[in-house]
Amino acid sequence: MIRVVIAEVRKLRRPSLLLGTIATVGGLSALFTSIVFLMINSKDGNSKRGEHVGVEELSQASGLIYGFRLVGIFLGIVALCIFASQTAQEYSLGTLRNLLVRQPSRMKILAGKFIAMNLFALVMVIFAGTMSIALSFALAGRAKVDTSSWTTGAARKLLFESTLNIFIATLCFGAVGMILGLLFRSPISAIAVGVLWTLILENILAALITSIAKWLPGLNFSNLGEGGNMILSYKHSLATSLAYLIISGGIAAILFKRRDVAN
C-alpha cells in the first residue's frame, strides 16, 4: 500500500495540479482575509452574509484566525473537486486496469489513494492558513487592529484547533468527492453533483425546511470547520458526518471491489 501512496503522491505533485491548486487556495485566502481587514468600516459588512466585524473583535486572540475560518468551507469544495477528479479519472482514462495489474488488492489501492490525497489536503490547508495569517498581520496596521493578543498562548491554541477543525472538514468534503468519483466514474459528473448539492441545493433546503438543516451533510462538514456554534454543536456535526461517510463510503467501497473494470 505504501507504493500506492507514493505513486499517487507523484500524480498529485504534477505542476498543472499542484500549482493550480496553490494559486486557487492562495487567491481565496487572500480574497477573504483582505475583505475582513480592508472593509472593516464598510456599511456592507466585512464577513459572511453581510455581518460586520469591528476592530475590537479582531484585536482579540480569535482575530488571528478569522480570515482563515472564512476560507475553510471553500477549501472543502476544492478538496471535493480534486478527490472526485483523481478518483473518477482512473475509470475515464482507463488506468485502473493497469493499477490492478501491479496491485491486485482493490482495497489497498483505494486506501493508498485516500491517504495520498489526505496528505495533499493537509498541505493545502497549511498553505491557506499560512497565507491568511501573514496577510492578517500585514493588513492589521492599516485597519488599526491591535495584534498584541495574536502572539499569546491562547491565540496559538486557537490557531492549532482551527487548523485541525478545518483539516477535518476538508477531509470530509474530500471523502465525499472520492465517493462520488467511485459512484459516477466520471470526473465531470462527480464534481457537478458534489458542488451543486453542497453550494446550492443544501442551502435551498435549509432555507425552506429549517428543521432539516442540522441533518444535511455539507452544513455539518462546514460546521466542523467552524468549530461548532450555538445552534449546531460540534459533537452533533461530528457524529452526523461520520455516519454519512461510513455508510456512503461502505457502499462505494463494495461497488469498487465488485464492479468489473472495462478496457
Image (spheres, rainbow, N blue to C red):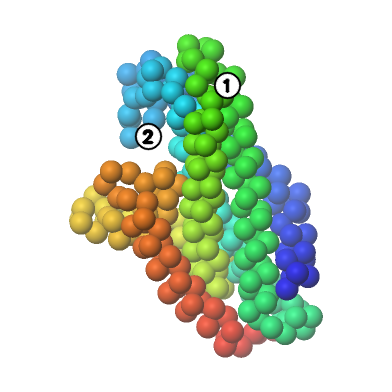
Between 167 and 211, the one nearer to me in the picture: 167
- Secondary structure category for the residue under label 2: helix
Q: Residue at x 61, y 33 (%)?
A: 131
Residue 204 in the figure: left or right of residue 26: left
**Residue 259 at what x, y percent from top left?**
57, 86
Residue 70 in the figure: left or right of residue 18: left
How many other residues sit within 10 Å of disc 2, few (<14), some (14-19) or many (≥20)? few
Q: Quadrant of residue 152?
A: top right
Q: Which residue is mark 1?
A: 137
Q: Quadrant of the C terminus?
A: bottom right
Q: Residue at x 59, y 61 (%)?
A: 83
Q: Quadrant of residue 39?
A: top left
**Residue 87 at what x, y percent from top left?**
61, 68
Q: Is residue 179 above or below residue 230?
A: below
- Secondary structure category for the residue under label 1: helix
Between 12 and 110, the one nearer to me in the picture: 110
Q: Is residue 155 above or below residue 147?
A: below
Q: Residue at x 59, y 84 (%)?
A: 257
Residue 197 in the figure: left or right of residue 176: left
How many other residues sit within 10 Å of disc 1, few (<14), some (14-19) or many (≥20)? some
Between 94 and 240, the one nearer to me in the picture: 240
**Residue 154 at what x, y percent from top left?**
49, 31
Q: Which residue is mark 2?
A: 48
N-term-proximal mark, 2 vs 1: 2
Q: Residue at x 77, y 66 (%)?
A: 7
Question: Amino acid type of disc 2?
Answer: Lys
**Residue 247 at what x, y percent from top left?**
43, 74
Q: Quadrant of the N terminus?
A: bottom right
Question: Amino acid type of disc 1?
Answer: Phe
Q: Report the Cα–Cα distance between label 2 and label 1.
A: 21 Å
Q: Is residue 155 visible?
A: yes
Q: Is residue 39 visible?
A: no
